[in-house]
Image: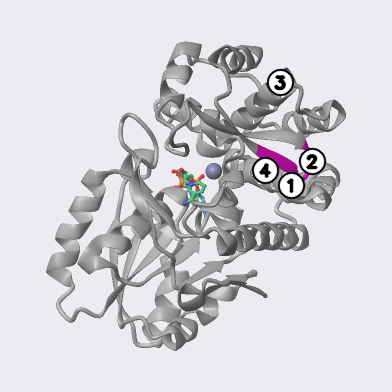
Amino acid sequence: MKKIRVELNQRAYSVFIGRGILSSLGERLRQLNIGSDCYIITNAWLKKKYSKVLDAPLRSSGFTLRYMIIPDSEKSKSFESACNIFEDLAVVDKKKNIFILAFGGGVIGDLSAFIASIYRRGIPYIQIPTTLLAQVDSSIGGKAAVDMSAAKNLVGAVYQPKAVFSDNGLLKTLSSRQIRAGLAEIIKYGVIKEPGLFDFLEKNYNSVLMLNEAKLEYTISRCVKIKADIVKKDELDQKGIRAILNFGHTIGHAIETAGGYFRYNHGEAVALGMLVAIDISRLIGLANEKAARRIDCLIQQTGLPHRIRGIGIDAIVKAHYHDKKFKGASNRFVLFKDIGKVMLVENVPLSVIKKAIKNRF
Ligand SMILES: NC(=O)c1ccc[n+]([C@@H]2O[C@H](COP(=O)([O-])OP(=O)(O)OC[C@H]3O[C@@H](n4cnc5c(N)ncnc54)[C@H](O)[C@@H]3O)[C@@H](O)[C@H]2O)c1
Ligand SMILES: [Zn+2]
């Protein structure tokens, strides 16, 4: 088992990574002293498949359990779902000793964090990410949000969990499409921060896709460490440091939104968004061409999408205006210089953005 600290002074917490770590979940939660009533937010399939993994360690440590089942869709990351859950919490939270346990992928994690951040002005929550994408990215860093029809993650907060438990044994039931989606965010970490991780992925992407335990544990730990270090320096995303995690996300989110949140999943949209960001970087003369080709090639080899299908360019351009990551500029992109080197660029001309998107049709 690996333990990585997200160092945030009084909000610091540990990310536990390893196969089988959930057997000690009850004891570890007891040590955190976050309450006695565990409110588990998950979906029906995950509950049926995995409740036995959670129930025994939690009950034997004296926790009461209540499951809240939400529909399995990005559409669950909504105000409506949050309100339904607030109503239920208000009824069941008699002893005011409740904490939330998010058991699922990024959708459940983001929604649970959002609820925990505002219910009774904030209650403790725990992340148990069950997708590769959530284990390497969304469960760490405290970004809590719900989507609006105009744009993703438009309403939310930064609210840190009390701990994260990443058991890669849970990934065995993921579809290969979902594993690839996680790999897209992993490639992102290599590109923005760690050439060594990128080299490793070029040689080992297939082992990661096949869920090789040692390679997976190494990969997840590297990504968590990179994200923990970035979040530590810029928790509230105000210094332009955390912003580099959005590489591929400006156009990626626009593709996800324009596709109605179902044509492309988050990781697939991010893969396409990274390719568009690289093309913008090429067009403005920023990109190291050899390195850019290595990324193109890795994304194609992993089977992630590299051409945009079934969405019009105008819908993508319209959706990208709702990106909330810039103020006082017409847009802000994380652009690519070399592997391990990205930079923030504001006010990219619309003609360049459109050309780069067109390149990917
Ligand atoms: N908060 C952040 O910092 C952050 C970062 C990246 C992404 N996100 C958000 O995360 C979301 C995407 O997360 P995701 O890719 O995990 O999607 P998801 O939560 O929709 O999960 C993908 C699918 O996998 C299924 N699933 C989950 N665990 C499984 C398991 N162990 N076995 C089999 N099936 C399983 C789910 O039921 C779902 O159908 C997006 O909403 C995105 O905006 C947030
Ligand atoms: Zn992402």
Question: At x 60% / y 34%, what residue is drawn?
Answer: 248
Q: Return the mark for residue 339.
A: 2
Q: Earlier in the sequence, mark 3 or mark 2?
A: 3
Residue type, numbered disc 1: Gly
Question: At x 58% / y 32%, what residue is drawn?
Answer: 333
Image coordinates for residue 218, horizontal then vertical, percent? 75, 61
Where 203 sits versus 330, above or below?
below
Q: Secondary structure at mark 2?
A: loop
Image coordinates for residue 348, horizontal then vertical, percent? 58, 23
- Marker count (numbered): 4
Report, in whole angstroms, how far the alpha carbon at label 4 lies from the one at label 2: 10 Å
Is the Cβ of the residue at disc 4 closer than 8 Å to that at disc 1?
Answer: yes
Question: At x 57% / y 17%, what residue is drawn?
Answer: 349
Q: Identify the magenta region.
A: 338-343
Of badges 4 and 2, the one in the foreground is 2
Of badges 1 and 2, the one in the foreground is 2
Q: Is residue 240 left or right of residue 295?
A: left
Residue type, numbered disc 4: Lys
Please, which residue is most extreme toward the front here?
A: 328
Q: Is residue 231 left or right of residue 157?
A: right
Residue 341 among those drawn in magenta? yes
Q: Quadrant where the N terminus lies?
A: bottom right
Q: Return the mark for residue 188.
A: 4
Q: Return the mark for residue 190.
A: 1
**Looking at the rendering, which quadrant does residue 103 occupy?**
bottom left
Report, in whole angstroms, how far the alpha carbon at label 3 lies from the one at label 2: 17 Å
**Looking at the rendering, which quadrant does residue 293 occupy?**
top right
Mark 4 CB lies closer than 8 A to ligand 2: yes
